[in-house]
Image: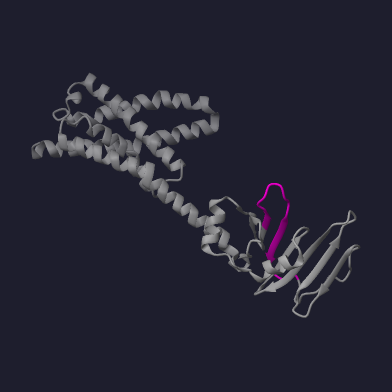
Amino acid sequence: MTSGRGALTALHLLLVWALTAVAVPTLGFGLLVSAWSGGAGAAVPVLVVGVPLMVGLLATAGLPARTVVPLCGSARQRFGWAALVFVLGTLGVLAGLAAYGGGVDLGSATTRIVLTGMPYAVAAAFFVPSRWVRLGAVAALGVAVAYGGFVGPARSEHRRHEAEVAWYQEHAELLYLGAVPPGMEVSRAEVGPAYFGVDYRTVRQDASAYVSLSVRPPLTPTPRCPKFAEEGVTCTVDAHGEVRTVREFPYGGRAVTLTRRHGGAEAEVTSQTVDESGLRRLLDTLHPLSDAELEELMRDKKIDHRT
């Protein structure tokens, strides 16, 4: 390809890109406004007028390329070429919209408008009878597919994951986990605006055991029992400030709750099936929730956030 033909080809592709980068977002905005105000039926007239207008504008953009693009040699051929470029380019735009809707970062609004014209310029490049121009179009298409299908989603997922971790760690001073009692596992954890709750349940299907751990800011300046005792509830505070509450049930069972200060937080464990020594062992092993433990809870979908 001579320098003159190369410059003309570059001008041709630049013209296709510039025209579509302006006209396609305008058409899309018109469709959005008409559909918003009058429903899907109101968008049909915009399509009926807009699509032929787009094809006509592309055919006009093909005029300077009459000597380098065989399909632009005559008026009839130019309109066929314009229709093909419009269809192929629009498919590329729709693929970009799908990727953007899936969370792929396509930059600022200005960048996205600039990128709108790229699929049409790439489509037009495939009709240029030059091996290097077509190889460039293939390379651009490959980069777009790789970014939209693999790199972009991976980066988007990484950003979402980091945001989710930061969300859970907003109140890191409350994120404490105890050693899992024998024969049990963490079944559920929940992060709230002022608490962190963990449920431990038995691993065996033929057995039933449950422990609830709750970590929150202290409810009172010093550990103490309620002033007014409930019927069937006994409460004591030992010399170390641990509050022991036992609730006796009419059917004969009972629930034991141990509450202990841990740093600037207050940890409480409750169970009807695990004895006091097991509950104290859980409180004794409280430790800040590690990144690995948080990752495992998130991976197993055992943690949730409540606002």
Which of the image's four quarters has the C terminus?
Answer: bottom right
The residue shown at (89%, 53%) is 251
Q: Residue at x 76, y 58 (%)?
A: 273
Say if 287 sits above or below 145 in the image.
below
Residue stretch in magenta: 199-219
Give how far across and how far down residue 10 sits, in percent: 18, 39
Considering the image in quadrants, where does the N terminus appear? top left
Q: Is residue 262 visible?
A: yes
Inspect the magenta stretch and tell me whether residue 208 lies in it: yes
Q: Residue at x 25, y 25 (%)?
A: 81
Horizontal relation, residue 207 to residue 299: left or right: right
Residue placed most toward the observer, 63 or 142: 142
- 119 or 55, which is in the foreground? 119
Q: Position of residue 8 (x, y in %)?
A: 15, 36
Quadrant in the picture for residue 218: bottom right
Residue occupying the point 58% across, 50% down: 301
Q: Determine which quarter of the picture holds residue 282.
A: bottom right
| Left or right of 302 on screen, residue 232 | right
Relative side of 5 to 110, left or right: left
